[in-house]
Image: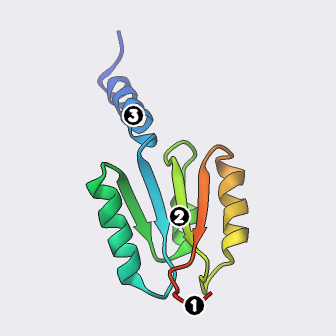
Amino acid sequence: MPTVTQKLQKQQQQLIHNNKKNRILIIQGDNHPDNYATLKLDLEINGFIVDTYTDPLVALNNFRAGLYAMIVLEKKMSKMNPVYLHKKFKEIDEGVRICILSSSEIY
């Protein structure tokens, strides 16, 4: 017979599995925070669970394989190159989808 701890762990794993398909991680840059607030709100209105970080190093340290269906990265981050960050996320979870966006009006 499973213990209470085992039951709780199983429930947590099931929640993660059920939520993964609609869970998105956004790592925003230093510019245009209102754009990312709008993006987060729009995604949440449409049923997504959205986690946001402003520090890419903290996001990378807290990232776990299998938790997110997609990661949205800001193209212009001051602390870390988004292509390098993309590579690091893929090393942890090769199945996660990653999108690099620019919130700038000027390309």
- Residue type at mark 2? Val
**Residue 67 location in percent, x, y?**
49, 45
Residue furthest out toward the front: 106
Q: Which colour scheme is used?
A: rainbow
**Residue 69 location in percent, x, y?**
51, 47
Residue at image coords 36%, 15%: 2
Decide: marks 3, 2 in contact (CB < 8 A)? Answer: no
| Residue 88 horizontal side relative to residue 44, left or right | right
Label 1 or label 2, whichever comes before in sequence order: 2
**Marks 1 and 2, how far apart in space?**
19 Å
Mark 2 closeness class: few <14, some 14–19, many ≥20 residues within 10 Å: some
**Residue at the disc numbered 1:** 106
Q: How many labels does the image show?
A: 3
**Residue at the disc numbered 3:** 18
Decide: marks 3, 1 in contact (CB < 8 A)? Answer: no
**Residue 37 location in percent, x, y?**
34, 74
Mark 1 closeness class: few <14, some 14–19, many ≥20 residues within 10 Å: few
- Residue type at mark 1? Ile
Mark 3 closeness class: few <14, some 14–19, many ≥20 residues within 10 Å: few
Label 3 or label 1, whichever comes before in sequence order: 3
Out of 77 and 34, give the one closest to the viewer. 34
Residue at image coords 40%, 61%: 51
Residue furthest out toward the top: 1
**Residue 92 location in percent, x, y?**
66, 50
SS for callout 3: helix
SS for callout 2: strand
When the figure is inspected, residue 102 is found, relative to residue 96, above or below; the finding is: below
**Marks 3 and 1, how far apart in space?**
38 Å
Judged by depth in the image, the label closer to the viewer, 1 or 2, is 1
**Residue at the disc numbered 2:** 72
